[in-house]
Structure formats: structure tokens, C-alpha cells
Amino acid sequence: MKRFRLLLMAAVMHPLFPASAATEARLPNVIVIMADDLGYGDVSCYGATSIRTPHIDRLAKEGLKFTSGYCSASTCTPTRFSFLTGTYAFRHKGTGIAAPNNPAIIQPDTVTLPGLLKQAGYQTAVIGKWHLGLGGATGPDWNGLLKPGPREIGFDYCFLLPTTNDRVPQVYVENHQVLNLDPQDPLWVGSKKPSPDHPTGRTHRATLKMDWSRGHNGTIHNGISRIGFYTGGHAARFRDEDLADEWVRRSIQWIEQQRDTPFFLFFSSHDLHVPRMPHERFQGTTTQGFRGDSIVQLDWCVGQLKNTLDRLQIAEQTLVIFCSDNGPVLDDGYRDNAVEKLGDHRPAGPYGGGKYSVLEGGTRTPLIAHWPGRIKPGISDALVCTIDLATSLATLAQVDLPERACLDSLDLLDAFLGDPSAAGRDHLIQQDNGRRGNYGFRVGNWKLQRHDSRRSRNTRLRLKNRQVPRYALFDLETDPGEKHNVAADHPQVAQRMQQQLTQLIQAGRTRPTH
């Protein structure tokens, strides 16, 4: 691996390396495309047959497709926290699903992936869904400067959906301000109705163009009710159907501006999170309803970004990572026919569970690395996780990590770039949401589940009507769906893994010290 890495550095940095005439003697660009709620089996290169994703398939065909690619949590906020900080979210207070008025979760003094790349001279941007809070201790000042935020943790530019689109408000944030906000129509965001006659999904349900199934019945915008309440800011509000188009447009514009300097773009898609409301030109393109149509829209976004790299002749200078923030979910609060139109489609592929769970389907997702001329096309069984991108990309950029930063991010650059001898991780901790939830722990083909949350242990909501013990052991080689607890058959393995998981959680870090 050491020899592979030395050759790689020579390839990236040496001006005489003859990869192609278009390759410059500079660090590579990096684009991370993170889908939202996309399952292992949701794209055709991972087995989907009722949905076609030609642009994602092209990345997989020309690049490296991982069969054991993971995010670190089965909900969005903790995965995004871990991706940017390189630290498991369960180690940090307040990393559960962020509320609309949540203060900034990642503080300005935190070492982050974009901050590390800035040290190497990269221009950095995040475009898309944020959902990591904005503002100081009292939360966002929607009518003033929204800081701290992405620009205080290493991003030069940001164009954001500030929370997630099933939560208020439906506005864009560009850098430190709400875009197009009229001072004469101030924006107010709260957790309680601002007035008794404020229209909501409960009081005006008959007016909705997409009905809610549970919870999403606060303020109505664009015919869809949301979690929470807001008033004002009408000139700043967007149309759900236009989100993907706007983020692609902004991304292409930013890439064109940075074409002559190394850049890092975090393209944070909202597809296929609820409310699923793809642009009209994608509606009806699949048999899966708006959920399937949103996957097609996501695939179009990937194609637009890839075509831009080709048009600008910088594809061979650009490492593209495609991933998801957690596994799939069908009914997640809206009646959009995702369940009714599922057919024989298996969103999580062969794996059990999905979003919110610590079963494999919650965190094992599509993960593809693409870099023409650098990554040999193929399939990798190496165990890798989006939490590892911070340290791995810092190595690529030749930036040293502080000892007390990126506490759980391993240097897996060799695995991400296709070294055939790279095994990846020897273990991975998975979590659901927040600090005191539940854990999955994979070591080889063994998978331990640890359920600490009373919700998961004592209710039937997330585990398909199965009560679960605090600890359960599964052999993923023979039981990828985690249906058969074999702890009683392998007590020594179960005991060893219980102790190891406890030690790793209590140790405060898993990245080796030097």
C-alpha cells in the first residue's frame, strides 16, 4: 500500500506524469454527491430493475463500485456531521435530527473536511441541503446574518436549503443571508402556531396537493404542509419542484468559476427525501410514483455535473464520490404512494431495515468513486464509510491532521482509489439518531446490534413488528437481512463484540494516535 500511495502522489503532483494532455500538475478537484434517503437497491447498478439510473451507472462502470460502502448513521444530521468532522456523531451532544431553529451544530473551531482542503489551497462550496443548524446559541437570525454556518467551518461559498424540506422554512440561504428576502416582509420561524387562524395541514387539509400521513401538518407552502410554522418571507420562498434545477445551475456556475484552481464541491441533494416533489418533467417517468421519479431526477443531477466536467475538460482532474446520507424509507410522513407503487422493487437490496434503523439497510448504501485515468474500473468489497473521507482526502491533499481532530476517520485513500490490496476498515460502528440511541457494529461478516433506546427496544415501530433484545448477533454472509439472531450459537463472538463495542465508544476515538 505504501508503494501504491507513493505512485499515486507522483501521479497527482509530478508535472511529467503522462496521464493525458488535459492533466495539470496540481491537486485533483473533489466532488462529493450525497443523495438523501437513497437505498442500496434503489439504483440500477446496484440491482434495481424497475428504475433506470444511467448516469449513476456510468460512474459505477467507469469507476469503483463498493459493495460495503456505508454512511455512519441512519438519519441525515448525524451522517452529515460525521462526514464533515470525521467524528462519530454519538460522541457529540445535539447531533440528532436538527430542528428548523437549531443553532449551528458544528462550531467554528472544529477541524472539518472543507477546512483541511482549504489549507491545501482548495476553493470549497456546499450547495444543497444543509440540516446542521445555523447561527449562535439562540439559533438563526432569519432576517439578519446567519452565522456561524458553513462559511465558518471551511466553506468559501454556500447555497443552501437551511434545514430539510419537510421542515420550515422553504427559502434559500446564500452565504450568510436568506436569498431575496424583502425587509418589509420579515421571516418568522417557530414551533407553535403564530395565530389561531394560521392555516395548517390539519385545518386546511382539503387544500393540500400532497396529503400528510403523520406529523407533517404545520404551515402550508406550495400545497404541502410541513413540520413547524413560519410566516412572511414570501418573495424568498421557492417552489419544491425547482430545487434540483436550482442546485445544478448554481453548481455548474461555481464549477465554471473554479475550473483553473483545485476545488471541493459538496453537492448535497435533497432527492429522494420527503416531500418528494420532483420537477414536472420527471413526474410519471417511473412506475414507482414520486419516490421513483425523484431517483430519476437525482440521476439527472449526476449526469449534469458529470457532463460539466467533460465539457470543461477537467474530468481527469476530478475525483467524484457518490454516496447517500442513510438508507431508504417509504412512508416518511406523506401519502405519496411510495408503498402502494413499490411492486417488486427492493429499496435496501438484500439488506434488512432502512432509515432510522441500525440494520444494514440503514447505513449500507451505494458508494462509488470515479476518477478517469486514476481509478481502475471495478468492484471493491473493501469496507469504507463516508466518515473516512475527511482523513483520506486530507492525505490526498497532503495536509496533516491535528491529533485531536477527525477522531473516527480512518485513512482509507488506498481503498477509495482502488488499491487491490487495500482491505478497508476492520470494523465499523453504525448508529441511528442522536447520542443515546442504538448501535450496529460490524466486524468482518459478524454484525452485532445493540439497542439502548427504549423506543426501539419496547415498541414495534422500526423493526417490522419484531421485539428486539438489547444485544443480537448476525452472520451477514448467510443472513444479510439480519433475521436470525445467532448470539446463543456463538456466545464467545457475541461477548467479544459487546466488549469491543463498549470499549470503542468509551475510548472517545477510533482513529489511531501517532
Image: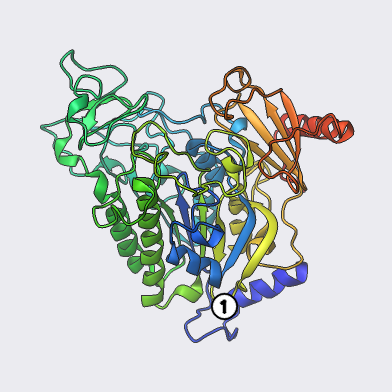
Residue 119: horizontal and vertical position, in percent? 53, 57
Number of labels in the image equals: 1
Colour option used: rainbow
Q: Which residue is most to the top? A: 196
Q: Where is 252 relative to 80, above or below? A: below
Q: Where is 347 relative to 412, above or below? A: above
Pointer 1: what residue? 373
Q: Is residue 29 visible?
A: no
Position of 259 compared to 445: left or right? left
Is disc 1 surrounded by few (<14), some (14 to 19) or many (20+) residues within 10 Å? some
Q: Type of residue at label 1?
A: Gly
Position of 271 compared to 389: left or right? left
Residue 197: horizontal and vertical position, in percent? 15, 16
Residue at x-position 61% and y-position 31%: 90
Q: Which residue is most to the front? A: 343
Residue 59: horizontal and vertical position, in percent? 50, 67
Query: Could you say which is closer to the camera, residue 429 or residue 140?
Result: 429
